[in-house]
Protein backbone atom coordinates (compact mmCIF):
# COMPACT_ATOMS: atom_id res chain seq x y z
CA UNK A 1 0.00 0.00 0.00
CA UNK A 2 1.31 3.46 -0.85
CA UNK A 3 2.44 5.82 1.87
CA UNK A 4 1.69 9.54 1.58
CA UNK A 5 3.56 12.28 3.40
CA UNK A 6 2.79 15.99 3.25
CA UNK A 7 4.54 18.92 4.84
CA UNK A 8 4.23 22.67 5.22
CA UNK A 9 7.51 24.54 5.46
CA UNK A 10 7.63 28.22 6.35
CA UNK A 11 10.84 29.74 4.99
CA UNK A 12 12.54 32.91 6.20
CA UNK A 13 12.10 35.70 3.66
CA UNK A 14 15.81 36.33 3.22
CA UNK A 15 16.38 32.69 2.18
CA UNK A 16 13.40 32.34 -0.16
CA UNK A 17 15.24 32.12 -3.48
CA UNK A 18 17.95 29.79 -2.16
CA UNK A 19 15.31 27.53 -0.66
CA UNK A 20 13.36 27.29 -3.91
CA UNK A 21 16.46 26.15 -5.79
CA UNK A 22 17.49 23.72 -3.06
CA UNK A 23 14.07 22.12 -2.51
CA UNK A 24 13.64 21.65 -6.28
CA UNK A 25 16.98 19.85 -6.39
CA UNK A 26 15.97 17.73 -3.41
CA UNK A 27 12.68 16.70 -5.03
CA UNK A 28 14.52 15.72 -8.23
CA UNK A 29 17.11 13.67 -6.33
CA UNK A 30 14.36 11.81 -4.48
CA UNK A 31 12.45 10.82 -7.59
CA UNK A 32 15.60 10.10 -9.60
CA UNK A 33 17.46 7.96 -7.05
CA UNK A 34 14.87 6.48 -4.68
CA UNK A 35 13.05 3.55 -6.26
CA UNK A 36 10.27 3.80 -3.69
CA UNK A 37 9.68 7.55 -4.14
CA UNK A 38 6.84 7.65 -6.64
CA UNK A 39 6.10 11.37 -6.48
CA UNK A 40 7.63 14.44 -4.87
CA UNK A 41 5.87 17.71 -5.67
CA UNK A 42 6.71 21.10 -4.23
CA UNK A 43 4.18 23.95 -4.25
CA UNK A 44 4.45 27.58 -3.18
CA UNK A 45 1.47 29.36 -1.65
CA UNK A 46 0.21 32.20 -3.87
CA UNK A 47 -0.53 34.71 -1.11
CA UNK A 48 2.35 33.79 1.18
CA UNK A 49 5.42 33.01 -0.94
CA UNK A 50 7.35 31.86 2.13
CA UNK A 51 4.97 28.92 2.65
CA UNK A 52 5.69 25.67 0.80
CA UNK A 53 3.63 22.50 0.53
CA UNK A 54 5.46 19.22 -0.12
CA UNK A 55 3.44 16.26 -1.40
CA UNK A 56 5.26 12.93 -1.42
CA UNK A 57 4.09 9.44 -2.36
CA UNK A 58 6.14 6.35 -1.52
CA UNK A 59 5.55 2.76 -2.55
CA UNK A 60 5.37 1.75 1.13
CA UNK A 61 6.31 2.93 4.61
CA UNK A 62 9.74 1.26 4.36
CA UNK A 63 10.52 3.37 1.28
CA UNK A 64 9.75 6.51 3.28
CA UNK A 65 12.03 5.33 6.08
CA UNK A 66 14.82 4.76 3.55
CA UNK A 67 14.20 8.26 2.23
CA UNK A 68 14.67 9.72 5.73
CA UNK A 69 18.00 7.89 6.03
CA UNK A 70 19.35 8.78 2.58
CA UNK A 71 22.42 10.97 2.22
CA UNK A 72 20.60 13.47 0.00
CA UNK A 73 17.79 13.87 2.57
CA UNK A 74 20.26 14.38 5.42
CA UNK A 75 22.21 16.88 3.31
CA UNK A 76 19.01 18.75 2.41
CA UNK A 77 18.01 19.02 6.08
CA UNK A 78 21.47 20.31 6.94
CA UNK A 79 21.50 22.81 4.06
CA UNK A 80 18.11 24.37 4.93
CA UNK A 81 18.20 24.13 8.73
CA UNK A 82 18.71 27.89 9.13
CA UNK A 83 16.33 28.81 6.30
CA UNK A 84 13.16 27.12 7.59
CA UNK A 85 11.46 28.71 10.57
CA UNK A 86 8.61 26.21 10.96
CA UNK A 87 7.67 22.71 9.75
CA UNK A 88 4.44 20.72 10.02
CA UNK A 89 4.20 17.11 8.85
CA UNK A 90 1.29 14.80 8.14
CA UNK A 91 1.17 11.11 7.27
CA UNK A 92 -1.80 9.73 5.36
CA UNK A 93 -3.46 6.36 4.91
CA UNK A 94 -5.51 5.71 1.81
CA UNK A 95 -9.14 4.84 2.54
CA UNK A 96 -10.29 4.33 -1.02
Image (cartoon, rainbow, N blue to C red):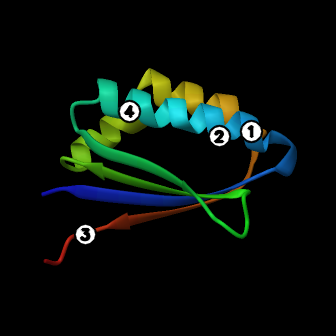
Tag 3 or tag 4, which sits nearer the N-term? 4
Residue 38 in view? yes
* Residue receiving disc 2: 20
Q: Label 1 neighbourhood size at 10 Å, few (<14), some (14-19), many (20+)?
A: few
**Left or right of 19, for residue 57:** left
Asked if the residue under mark 1 is in contact with the one under mark 2, i.e. CB atoms within 8 Å, the reply is yes
Look at the numbered disc 4 and give the secondary structure of its residue: helix
Q: Which callout, 1 or 3, points to the residue nearer the camera?
A: 1
Tag 3 or tag 2, which sits nearer the N-term? 2
Residue 81 in view? no
Which residue sits at x=73%, y=34%? Answer: 18
Q: Foreground residue, 73 or 13?
A: 13
Q: Which callout, 1 or 4, points to the residue nearer the camera?
A: 1
Expressed as whole percent of the image width and height from the top left, the position of residue 2 reads 18, 56
Q: Quadrant of the N terminus?
A: bottom left
Q: Label 2 neighbourhood size at 10 Å, few (<14), some (14-19), many (20+)?
A: some
Tag 4 or tag 2, which sits nearer the N-term? 2
Which residue sits at x=20%, y=71%? Answer: 94
**The residue positioned farthest toward the bottom in the image shown:** 95
Q: Which callout, 2 or 4, points to the residue nearer the camera?
A: 2
**Left or right of 47, for residue 3:** left
Which residue sits at x=24%, y=50%? Answer: 61
Which residue sits at x=25%, y=69%? Answer: 93
Look at the numbered disc 2 and give the secondary structure of its residue: helix
Asked if the residue under mark 3 is in contact with the one under mark 2, i.e. CB atoms within 8 Å, the reply is no
* Residue receiving disc 1: 17
Look at the numbered disc 3 and give the secondary structure of its residue: loop
* Residue receiving disc 4: 30
Asked if the residue under mark 4 is in contact with the one under mark 2, i.e. CB atoms within 8 Å, the reply is no
Q: Residue 93: which numbered mark, if any?
A: 3
Amino acid sequence: MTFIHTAHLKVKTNFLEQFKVRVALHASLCTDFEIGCLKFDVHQEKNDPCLFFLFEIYSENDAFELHRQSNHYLQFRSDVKDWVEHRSWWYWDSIH
